Amino acid sequence: MITQLRGRLLEKNPTHIVVDCNGIGYEVNISLHTFSRLKDEELITIYTHLQIKEDSHTLYGFIDKAERLVFRQLLSVSGIGASTARVMLSSLTPEQVIEAISTEDTDTIQSVKGIGKKTAQRVILDLKDKMQSTEALTEIVQSPSHANKEEALSALETLGYTRKQSGKIISRICNNNPNANVEEIIKLALKNL
């Protein structure tokens, strides 16, 4: 119903923002990822997801459509509600969520507060195919750092390491060194394998 808001940023907190759209102030729940990427500009655009329950109408806001799509995919998993999905996107970036699901990294998903082993496995089982086939996620996946990750993964597979084994290490390396090139990623990964 409400898919995006464009207006003046009245309030900015780590958990929510208030956006003034022609005199109406909308309180929008956000993740820490969105909070960190929101500039203190007066005019902003925020992509939203409206959740309607018997006792409340709650707006969730995202800095880009890809983060909103990951949020919606997470909501489709049994046992994951809006607050758990928001906590997941506050603990991990959308790229990290996609990477953890595609490399079947249950440890990364379990690192999110409130998610146990069974829920982490269910997230991977339910979303692995969806994440790989969703077009809007390609904007995240096609970023230069992700291209470097994929090249490094392919190189390590050629050297005989499994994708699952090297995927976790490469993700950690790329999170710590986002500007690392393929050669640096491979060298660091080989030291840790």
Image (cartoon, helix red, strand yellow):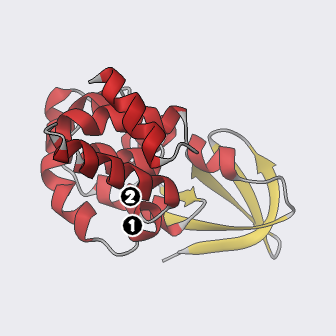
Determine whether 190 is above or below 13 in the image.
above
Residue shown at 38% from the left, 26% from the top: 113
- In the image, farthest residue toward the right: 42
| In the rendered image, the vertical position of residue 160 relative to residue 20, given as above or below | above
* Between discs 2 and 1, the one toward the N terminus: 2
Q: Where is residue 90 in the image (x, y as percent from the top left)?
A: 51, 39
**Secondary structure beneath label 1:** loop
Residue 70 tag number:
2
User: Is residue 67 visible from the viewing direction of this image?
Assistant: yes
Question: Is residue 166 found left or right of 60 in the rendered image?
Answer: left
Mark nearest the camera among 2 and 1 is: 1
On the image, numbered disc 1 is attached to which residue?
A: 137
Rendered location of residue 108, percent (x, y): 32, 32
Location of the C terminus (image quadrant): top left
Residue at the spot 72% in from the left edge and 53% down from the top edge: 38
Q: Is residue 81 visible?
A: no
The spot of residue 17 in percent (x, y) is 70, 51
